[in-house]
Image (cartoon, grey):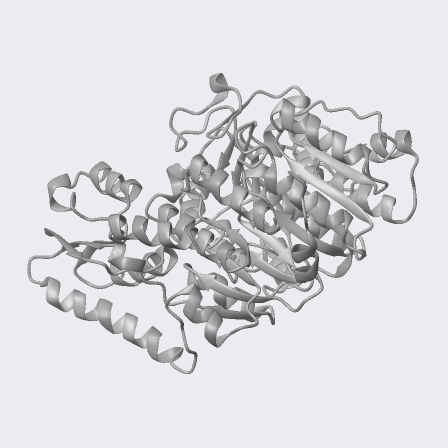
Amino acid sequence: MKKHILIRKNSYFDSVELMRISGILRKDEGVEDAQLIMGSDANKQFLIDMGLNEQDFSDATSLDLIIYFELVDSLSTEVILEKFDEILSLKDSGISDEYSPRSIEGALKIYSDINFILISLPGEHASWEAKNALREGKNVMIFSDNVTISEEIEIKKLALEKGLMVMGPDCGTSIINEIPLGFANKVRKGKIGLISASGTGLQAVTCEIHNLGEGISQAIGIGGRDLSSEVGGITMKTAITALINDPETEVIVLISKPPAPEVAEDIMNMLKESEMPFVLYFIHSNLKSDNNNVFIAKNLSHTAGLAVELLKGNRDKKDLETFNLQFEEFDIPELKTGKFIRGLYTGGTLADEAIVNLEKSGNKVYSNIHYKPEYKLENPLNSKDNTIIDLGDDFFTRGRPHPMIDPESRIEKLEQELTDPETGVILLDIVLGSGSHEDMAGALLPVLKKEKGEKIILAYVLGTDLDFQDKNMQVSKLRDVGVHIFESHISMIYFANEILKGKK
Amino acid sequence: MKINTEKINKLFQSKLVVLNIGVELFHDAIKNAEGQSINMDWRSPAGGDKRLLDIINKIKDGE
């Protein structure tokens, strides 16, 4: 085997596309490994961690393509590079009927009706283009997560000055005017407006609102850092004002981890001044509100349920804040082997919700994203007691696509858990919608079929009947191999907890 | 600072037309959801020359 490293200067490709092509090339005979990545600092560190010589690629910038191959001696790099170029040209020929502009200014000259700009470039370039977009008077969503906090503040202040909104950076999910952006679901148009610092949290609540028969006006992602004291909640405050002023919105939902105290206070003051009913779900928070128009939710399902009740006109604060969700009736199966829960999640907020709620029931839970350092797993590949894994965490996504797109990291972990004698119950989230894998249930089936009735497998299917993956088909594929299906995440956690308690 | 959301509320009342810059999967996803998206063939402005980018930024900020 020989290792080869080549650099193509000033040759930008998007990371998802490069990972897809790397995957195709790795399947070629004689190719032991193939990594096509842009030369960002994080990617260069990934190559160093793989044991490659830093000097071979230290000059590459985030605009340069690094090509790494490990090939059998008889295979030359020329052959494999030809194949790479062939895959690229095939793709280009498929979209030749569409004109692709090369700058925002150029795009706006031809398509003057563009009114929204979605950016998923590497960090520093995302900032540059976001500022360009704002200067052109356009609202922006930044999917990229590696924008510095000082850049974020600068961009958001510019937006505020121009009367525009910047969703993100690190905004994975939004639905604007019924169009899903990033990872988002197809839901009914309605009167509930949502603002969220959590992508999967927003997906879960929008889907549950749809599944309860109501719909949403707008679902606005703000990114994970907006509510920090540095950023001061600029986008959250802008979005709240916009939804209060929106004639289509009658109830507003806010979802986040606890904001910085001074930001929380500002927001609570804003809400107090409005007549609009608000639902707040701040994960890990013991928030209380005396305001008659502010209702505190206990979990994602409760958030959706509360919003729907408020839309129907129910304003009984005590009743709404304390009502217990009605769970589907199930017979609780007995554990056959193992005694621990192992959660393999693609959605970070769902993993978080699993940790918090399993702990509330008195279970000890370890995780790669645990909020308490003493329960953080040293090695996410080694489960311990009850373990909840967020496969979307950097540890699993370096050099490979997000697990909602690519099932490989979960398949590997699932195989491990199925053979672990300590594992009793396995939790899965199957996240449907735009951006996600076209058939996640189908992709997991070969490994799920290996299970011979020893482990109890539970899955929360996050999606709607309008999502392109065909939710019913996803559900029946999983049910056919004995997986228990849940329509709400909290009911899956409740069920898992009941199994641990050994109740019939 | 007072928050003016007139332009954002106008957006909420319009048909969304997206310019996608970066991951092409998102452009395809918008189109699959019957949305309108134009995909930009992104190239770094000024060939990625940071010094030149700073100068361009200063000119733009002065506009």
Residue drawn at x 74%, y 30% is: A268
Residue drawn at x 60%, y 53% is: A174
Residue drawn at x 51%, y 26% is: A370
**Residue A502 in sight:** no
Image height of A380 relative to A163, above or below: above
Q: Quadrant of residue A257?
A: top right
Residue drawn at x 83%, y 31% is: A321
Q: Is residue A244 left or right of residue A316?
A: left
Image height of A126 relative to B25, above or below: above
Instruction: Locate the C terminus of chain A by quadrant.
Output: top right
Asked whether A117 or A302 is in front, the reply is A117
Q: Is residue B12 left or right of residue A403?
A: right
Q: Quadrant of residue B24?
A: bottom left
**Residue A495 in sight:** yes
Asked whether B13 or A377 is in front, the reply is B13
Q: Quadrant of residue A17?
A: bottom left
Image height of B52 relative to A394, above or below: below
**Residue A117 in the image, given as x and y percentages of width and height:** 51, 60
The count of marks equals: 0
**Residue A437 in the image, given as x and y percentages of width and height:** 50, 58
Q: Is residue A323 left or right of residue A388?
A: right
Image height of A372 relative to A223, above or below: above
Q: Residue furthest left?
A: A74
**Residue A76 in the image, given as x and y percentages of width and height:** 9, 63
Q: Residue furthest front?
A: B62
**Residue A465 in the image, given as x and y percentages of width and height:** 69, 62
Q: Residue furthest top?
A: A374
